[in-house]
Amino acid sequence: MKQIGLFGGTFDPVHYGHLAVGKAAIARFAFDILYFIPAAVPPHKTERLITPFSHRVAMLRLALKDEPRFVVSEIEGQRNGPSYTIDTLSQFRQELGPGADFFFIIGLDAFGDITTWNRYRKLLAATSFVVIDRPTHHRRTVAQVVAEDLPDYREAGTGVWRNTAGMHIYALEMNPVAVSSSLVRERLRRRMDVQGMVPQVVVEYLRSNGLPLGEEVKG
């Protein structure tokens, strides 16, 4: 049975925080493949326009080229409409068949809103979740989200919960990386240094393609 990690996001742009999450997940779960899945039309990010999908894919490919188990998937760019995770998972299951176990990687902030996701109950019954648990003073812990919002789960070990469908939630603790895509966009917009935040090949791609990150860009 193959262990398949699915790491979705806008990746606008990809940065070292994303890469750190991927490496931590690979180290913990020994995935055969970890797919980075850029959203074509993120349903939860309607407050701004995003960089065109093709550019975000290209930047991911550059950033991941030295990691053989990191693979960029364009699966969400092949569909029309919002990039709902349940549809992405269903398509992966159709393509990879029954010989794959899926683990969806998600940040704690997004996981705290899981009950607002499209067909979230079906999603929870179809895949395990790896929740990146970073120290925070403003949001609930993974354990609190499970206890308050997800009554179908029972504790199955330290930082692990299991539901009646046999799917798990794993809290993956890792040191916070002081970078975000919004911070990178703002610094680039202000022509400030982003060394140590973004791979240099990504910075060069942004500049060579004249992408005005941090401003509204039509996709």
Image (spheres, rainbow, N blue to C red):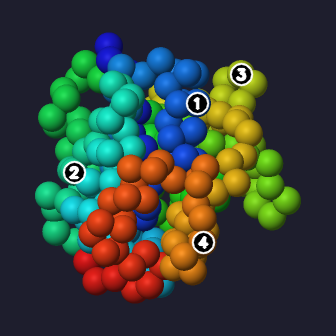
Q: Position of residue 35 (x, y in %)?
A: 34, 38
Give 2 or 37, whichever is nearer the viewer: 37
Report the residue marked by disc 4. Answer: 192
Tell which circle, 3 or 4, labels the residue nearer the N-terminal end: 3
Secondary structure at badge 3 equals strand
Tell which circle, 2 or 1, labels the residue nearer the N-terminal end: 1
Report the residue marked by disc 1. Answer: 24
Report the residue marked by disc 3. Answer: 157
The answer to whether residue 30 is above or below residue 164 is above
Query: Which image quarter holds the N terminus?
Result: top left
Give 137 or 89, whichever is nearer the viewer: 137
Q: CA distance from mark 3 to mark 4?
A: 45 Å
Tell which circle, 3 or 2, labels the residue nearer the N-terminal end: 2
Q: Position of residue 202 (x, y in %)?
A: 39, 54
Q: Label 4 amino acid?
A: Met
Secondary structure at badge 2 equals loop
Q: CA distance from mark 1 to mark 4?
A: 29 Å
Report the residue marked by disc 2. Answer: 74
Q: Position of residue 156 (x, y in %)?
A: 67, 24
Residue that appears at 76% across and 60% down:
139
Mark 4 surroundings within 10 Å by alpha-carbon count, few (fewer than 14), some (14 through 19), many (20 or more): few
Whether pointer 3 and pointer 2 mark residues with C-beta atoms closer than 8 Å, the reply is no
Q: CA distance from mark 4 to mark 2?
A: 31 Å
Q: Label 3 amino acid?
A: Gly
